[in-house]
Every structure is written in structure tokens, then in C-alpha cells.
Amino acid sequence: MGLFSRRSKEPEPVPHEAADPAPSETTPRDHGPWDVSEVEGIGKRVDLGSLWLPPRDGMELRMEVDRNTKVVTAAAVALGESRLQVQAFAAPKTEGVWDEIRAELAESVTKQGGTVDDVPGPFGRELLARLQVRTAEGRTGHRAVRFLGVDGPRWFLRAVLGGKAAVDPKAAEALEQVLADIVVVRGQEPRPPRDLLPLTVPGRPTTPAVQPPAAPRFDPLRRGPEITEIR
């Protein structure tokens, strides 16, 4: 996020040679998520296929697996009372998709009885949402979440912060740091925009014995299925 200052009505002339150079596309960033081309190897990150995830002390990693197709659909981590879910998708080469997806998310939340605010955050624009849910007692309640999105080179990373991180900025810092050090491995395969980039369970073979089902496409509000792998 940048800070903007107003110019005075009669600014003093600045010599050309003293002016600050305009930022270029190659200006280094101070945090990710990173493209694989921006890092030197995996380092200490955990290899999840299309995502390299930085571990943290006390962090629990869970791979969310579709019950029917057996496709790994998301990586989710828990740290204390906070949760982070991440998924990477294919995106067009020349433009980002977060603005469009953010609008779709906001519309879906409101149609389902929730509320949403589009606000600035540490990774750009994000959505603060209160999703309508049914409690165990059969009553209508709300669950707070933060939807974050990052447009990269031919990929889009969606992140969902839940639990305490959705309502307490201080509690969110640790998982925001995890998100800021994730690496996305897009691969060179042609993929239609919004196709889920393949994820793998750590320690399992990456080559299946049979042809896997097609990867699911982006669904803004879909949560990972209940069948999970725990590490």
C-alpha cells in the first residue's frame, strides 16, 4: 500500500538529474507470494506441487482431498486459533483476475445472506466477509472470513483467512507472513484460466497409476471437503 501526498499549489522546480527514477517492472518486492522464477530453490519450504509452503513452529498442515475424485483441492494450515487456506489457479498471461473474482465473491456472499466489505489489506484489495451458516442448534449464524487474492505471472493465488485471524489483525500476522513467503509453481502446461493448479500430498508419488480426473475449476465459496490428510 502506498502513501500519497498532495503537491503545493506552486511547487519548486526540481532539476532533472535530481529526480527519483520511476519504478520499473523489475523493482524487487519486499514480500511474496513469489513466482518460482523469483526464488533460488525450494529452501526449507514444503513441496506441495504447485505450491511451496514455508513451515512455522506449531503449524499444522492439512491437504484437502475431494471425496469422489481423490483430487487434492487445497492446502490448509492452522496456527493457534487461526486458519489459512490456499489454492493456486491458472490465469491469463496479460491480465489479472482478482478484480473480477473479488466482485463474484462479493455477489455470492450477499446472495447467500452474508455481508461483505471491500477494503485495502497487506496484499492489496481484500474482502472482509460474514458468511451465513447454520449452527448445530439449527439457528442461523455468521462466520467471519477474509478473502485475499494475488495475481502472478499466469497464475492467481486465492487465500482465505479464518478463525481469529479473520477478526484480529494481530492474530493474523503470523499467517500473513506464511502467505507472503509462499512460492507458486505454475508450470509450462497450457491451462484454461481458473483451472486449479495440481497439488500433491507431501511424501506421496506425484505420478498417479491411472489418469487423474480433470482438475476442478474455481468456485469462489467452495470450502475444501471434509476428508483430509494430516501431517
Image (cartoon, rainbow, N blue to C red):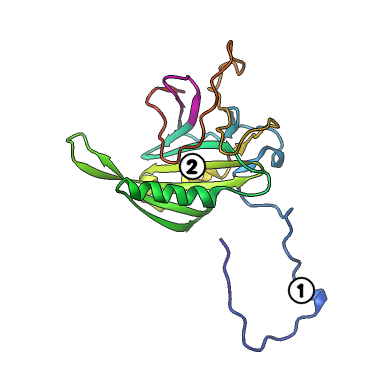
Q: Quadrant of residue 209?
A: top right
Q: Amino acid at mark 1?
A: Ala
Mark in front: 1 vs 2 = 2
Q: Quadrant of residue 163?
A: top left
From what the image shows, is residue 190 above or below residue 167?
above
Disc 1 to disc 2, how far (Cα)?
38 Å
Q: Residue placed at 72% from the left, 37% from the top?
A: 40
Q: Position of residue 56 (x, y in %)?
A: 50, 36
Residue 69 in view, yes or no: yes
Q: Residue placed at 36% from the left, 39% from the top?
A: 81
Q: Which residues are magenta?
A: 61-74
Q: Which mark is residue 159?
A: 2
Is 67 left or right of 152, judged from the image as shown?
left
User: Is residue 65 found inside the magenta-colored segment of the image?
Assistant: yes
Q: Residue placed at 50% from the left, 37% from the top?
A: 218
Mark 2 Cα shell of 10 Å, populated few (<14), some (14-19), many (≥20)? many
User: Is residue 6 found inside the magenta-colored segment of the image?
Assistant: no
* SS for callout 2: strand
Q: Position of residue 88 (x, y in %)?
A: 56, 36
From what the image shows, is residue 194 above or below residue 120?
above
Residue identified by numbered label 1 = 19
Is 129 left or right of 96, judged from the image as shown?
left
Is 140 left or right of 100, judged from the image as shown?
left
Mark 1 Cα shell of 10 Å, populated few (<14), some (14-19), many (≥20)? few
* SS for callout 1: loop
Extreme-bottom residue of the structure: 10
